[in-house]
Image: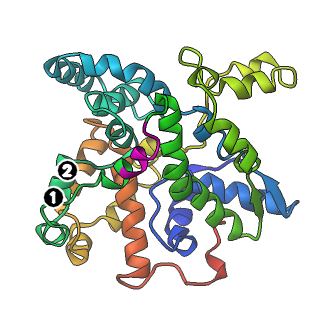
Amino acid sequence: MILRPAELPELVPRLPAMLDEPLGDASIIPTALLSRFARERVTVALGGDGGDELFAGYPMHQAQRVAAFGRALPAGLLALMERAIQALPVSHRNFSFGFKVLSFLRGAAEAPPRNHALWMSSFAGGEQLALLTDEVWAELGRGFDEFEPLEQAWSKSDGAPLLARVTHLDAVTYLPNDILMKVDRASMRVALEVRAPFLARPVVELAFGLPDRYRMRGLTGKRLLRAAVSDLLPPSVLGRPKKGFGIPVAAWLNQSLRSLAQDVLAPATLREGGLFRPETVERLQREHAHGVADHRKPLWTLLVFELWRQYHLGRAAAEPRSASAVPS
């Protein structure tokens, strides 16, 4: 099944009918389409969720391996590196070199779990200050710390090796609050049951008891899993680079999704919501459209949040609240 960009303006506005809370993970779209496609033939399917989280398969796990060197560099040098990358021509290719380097530098000076959160987040620190209105900050209060829940989760693995702690952090935060929730909403929308064999209790207990050397060799993750299936899969599969289940959001925000984003994130609509500063959102859209920066993550997050808010809390939804809202 091939997803075509022309389908997005009709598909994306239907996401709030599937979600009872906002989800800023763009892979909900291919997950929903794949679930519907699979449901044409089967009622139960197996998913690989947990493999990356338990056995260190994500790029951010590789980043943790080299982050210690980044923290040893002078802050001025990190800032200089960031400005140098920002001066290069911006590419909206999916996970371009510049996007990956800037994402790494965003959290390079911080220790875990804060660097982990910064690599994953859409807005943090000063970016939140520029985005949220004074009314929102008044509600949050001066002591607001977005890292506090992660710090609490991190403390539960005190004393364990680095990768064991990072994968545990993913297993108790990112996995249930994003990955499993995404698959559950997308699959159950079409009555498909997706089971996760990697999350069977014996597998989880085994994973959390492993030394880090069985998770990653050099910068190659999922070492134990690769060894376990080495006689079942060809080298071309075992050695190929990781391919995430994402979509080219950066390019599509300037193409098939541009009109939708401009409408949903219109200044008058944002002022009605009272959460985001319209001038900040306009700047993000302008910089992205003109190739000044790659704002795929913040703009996608804002887009799906505003669609959700307008559907559930704000003005009348563009889509009817019925089964007909299943992505198609």
| Callout 1 touching callout 2 (CB < 8 Å) | yes
* Image coords of residue 87 (percent x, y): 22, 23
Q: Is residue 212 magenta?
A: no
Residue closer to the observer: 271 or 172? 172
Residue at image position (56%, 43%) is 246
Magenta span contains residue 154: yes
Which span is picked out in magenta? 152-158
Label 1 – label 2 distance at C-alpha: 6 Å
Q: Answer with left or right where residue 201 lies relative to residue 16.
A: right
Quick check: can you spot residue 159?
yes
Residue 264 position, x and y percent, is 35, 67
Task: Please indicate, yes or no, whether residue 59 appears anywhere in the rendered image.
Answer: no
The image quarter in which residue 92 lies: top left
Amino acid type shown at disc 2: Arg
Q: Residues within 10 Å of mark 2 (few under 14, many from 20)?
A: few
Residue drawn at x 77%, y 48% is: 197
Read off the residue under disc 1.
Answer: 279
In the image, residue 176 sits, relative to residue 13, either above or below, namely: above
Q: Secondary structure at mark 1?
A: helix
Q: Residues within 10 Å of mark 1 (few under 14, many from 20)?
A: few
Q: Secondary structure at mark 2?
A: helix
Amino acid on which the number 1 mark rests in the picture: Glu
Q: Is residue 223 above or below residue 272?
A: above
47, above or below 51, in the image: below
Instruction: Please state if 259 lies on the left or on the right of 292 as rendered.
Output: right
Label for residue 283? 2
Indicate the position of residue 313 as horizontal and vertical percent values.
37, 82
